[in-house]
Image (cartoon, grey):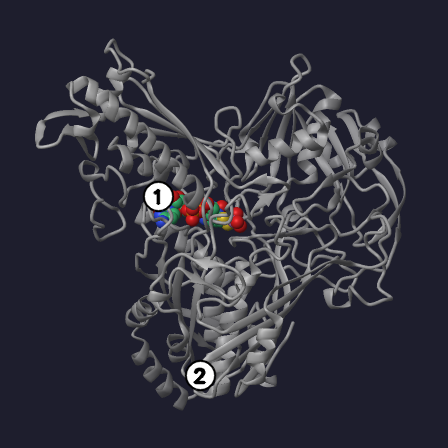
Amino acid sequence: TVEEPAGPAGPAAEERPIGFGRMKRKEDPRFVRGKGRYVDDVKLPGMLHGAVLRSPFAHARIVSIDTSAAEAHPKVKAVITGETLAGLGLAWMPTLSMDTQAVLATDKVRFQGQEVAFVVAEDHYAARDAIELIDVDYEPLDPVVDARRALDPAAPVIRDDLEGRTDNHIFDWEAGDRAATEEVFSRADVVVEQTMLYPRVHPAPLETCGAVASMDPVDGKLTLWTTTQAPHAHRTLYAMVAGLPEHKIRVISPDIGGGFGNKVGIYPGYVCAVVGSIVTGKPVKWVEDRSENLMSTSFARDYHMNGQIAATRDGRILGVRVKVLADHGAFNSTAQPTKYPAGFFHIFTGSYDIEAAHCEVTGVYTNKAPGGVAYACSFRVTEAVYLIERMVDCLAAELGADPADLRMRNLLQPEQFPYQNKTGWEYDSGDYPACLRKAMDLAGYEELRREQAEKRERGELMGIGLSFFTETVGAGPRKHMDILGLGMADGCELRVHPTGKAVVRLSVQTQGQGHETTFAQIVAEELGIPPEDIDVVHGDTDQTPFGLGTYGSRSTPVSGAAAALVARKVRDKARIIAGAMLEVSPDDLEWTKGRWSVKGDPAMTRTIQEIALAAHGALELPEGVEGHLEATTVYNPPNLTYPFGAYICVVDVDPGTGAVKVRRFIAVDDCGTRINPMIIEGQVHGGLADGVGMALMEFIGFDEDGNCLSGSFMDYLLPTALEVPAWELGHTVTPSPHHPIGAKGIGESATVGSPPAVVNAVLDAIGVRHADMPLTPGRVWQAMRHGQVEA
Ligand code: PCD
């Protein structure tokens, strides 16, 4: 492993790491030259263009649809409605949560922006013009907009398509020990209760969702270029749903301009593109615009939470209990492993050594877009971290304790790992106090508190907010986790060519994380082949082994392990071949990076490149050893990995306007063994910006009729370089004991950990116990006047 040099540029070319270390991304020459190849760049001969007609109403009965004018448009090739699809058995599709979702509405529309019809035309503009020519007669119905009213007996039933449905209830779920929790609450000196909303937000990737479907009428093979984070899972689902033979489907996920959970699910537009291609016999492209993306594809969060925390007077946390009302929108298409309808929310006990915990989650339908995706979040861990980190601050306020002291007092201790938490998770490793101490030192915590006290005297509002988070990433062990029955193990293949260059084939798919670099580094670390000599192939089901895809920061924990193990298999085979080359027993050889040498005689040595050539050459191989140098593996993780971190945010609030300035942000992350520190820093920077965005400006709002108020970037505000400070990063390294290279995920840590730090800082500045995100100037101003604001 190369020492991490200072400065962002990393080592000069001649010092580039053969393995882990700071190294510029192999994919960037393509991206910075504008040579990436995205779905919308795919242009096929004779390709047609599709557009979706969407519902203007949140809830309405469809009386009739007249497509005749659209069909008469000279450039239109097909108009597809729910009725067309019903004829093919495709009007409804299964969701990731075993619910059903309308591909194109047949009976009712259930959210504003829902897909009603699909037009295929010669060009994109004609398709867009023609959807305007479709005449739909709607009979508006009362919508259910507020999840807290969804279970009112008088509330209209949204999913009357489901047999026997009389209400909007989806599921009840609980975790932890209710009785033990009641017991600790009954003997607590202090109980603090707080209601809070984690508002509906959107992943808002730079590239929206889209697909190009090409059904070859001759060989019956469907090729689908699509913005997917999970190409193999998508292929299998298309096979199951559409009844197409799986080997006749090829899903290609080319360069993807950001996923963030938005590209995990299958959207009606993809299915329509496929049907459009089957109907017209031509390739069909569908790419949604920004408003369609914000209004109809997967939202995230929307958890109404009521938390209670119990403690002793001297600040020992005893227990936590939570009730959640989860707004899942019109179709339950939340992404999470089957067993967990509330995702990994039940890790809400966070990083603290507590005696008992219990949570109850109720999911409901509302007339809003479906989704509930894990936006930069391993299945609801974001909501969990927000809940506990806000509750700890509420407790600190109640006790008059310093939030850092209170956390330090209750953090799990290094000797408690592996730690079995009270709701069923086994945390693999950690040194939490060291991490928090490091963040406090980087921040100059004590000095900041002094500065704050002085400023308070002058009427200046400065706030310091902390959060300490534990994530659970790398889903997951097959025996506990599947999505729609597909187990969450990942395949990997490695082939070393005769000249010692290699190709590694992954089941996961990068959306900007830098897999072409880091997976080459993993193989390089294990085999000593330089990363630039290792090609990473991914995102094409015809070219790669099966696996469940990239989300929940699972690529490094699962596929990263597979890549290391497949390289070790190759290394073991290389040993036998090296033995034959050197005419010694393989047992007499020892490995140093890149070569097998005779123990005690380092001159007797063969490099991995020499061995690769011999493996393909004329050398007589030992009995039982096949030629060539390659291997495959499937990795089923024994546990998830538990990255963690300590974040400190410093804000200044304008007492006149409520405007928040994030002045400093200190983030100390621990993701175990670090493959590429430069990429890790990029991941953390991105996630911190996400967190500041959610805390201060992002949310998908609705009016009382269910009109979406956040359908463009004029209303859905994303943070820019102007709203975020220069991040101050640090790290600790606590390897995962069960991962072959000790690595944990990092991709989502900062998005998960940062919102509570920002919110805690703002509330600390204005001396208010709670106000719901996003803390826009208006809300902060209101909170300063009224003491609390709930959304
Ligand atoms: N790493 C390193 N080391 C360690 C770890 C890690 O180096 N220890 C690195 C790797 O290799 C990569 C990255 O880092 O490259 C990341 O990783 P991870 O953690 O494993 O993760 P992944 O799986 O790969 O990815 C995923 C994530 C997610 S999930 C999200 S949201 C986001 C993140 O990722 N997204 C994105 N980040 C990012 N970035 C970008 N650029 N883009 C995008 O889209 Mo979800 O669930 O989907 O919601």
- What quarter of the picture does the C terminus occupy? bottom right
User: Which residue carries the number 2 mark?
Assistant: 315
Could you tell me which secondary element the residue under label 1 belongs to? loop
Residue flagged by tag 2: what amino acid is it? Gly
Residue flagged by tag 1: what amino acid is it? Pro
Q: Nearer the viewer, residue 129 or 250?
A: 250
- What quarter of the picture does the N terminus occupy? top left
Q: In the image, residue 79 lies at what x, y percent?
A: 79, 30
Q: In the image, residue 333 lies at what x, y percent?
A: 67, 48
Instruction: Classify 420 as above or below 203.
Output: below
Outermost bottom residue: 457
- Side of 564 where 203 appears, left or right: right
The image shows a total of numbered marks equal to: 2
- Side of 334 where 55 appears, left or right: right
Which residue appears at 87% of the width and 52% of the height? 164
User: Which residue carries the number 1 mark?
Assistant: 740
Q: Marks 2 and 1, how far apart in space? A: 39 Å
Label 1, ligand 1: CB separation under 8 Å = no
Which residue appears at 52% of the width and 62% of the height? 347
Q: In the image, residue 711 lies at what x, y percent?
A: 66, 53
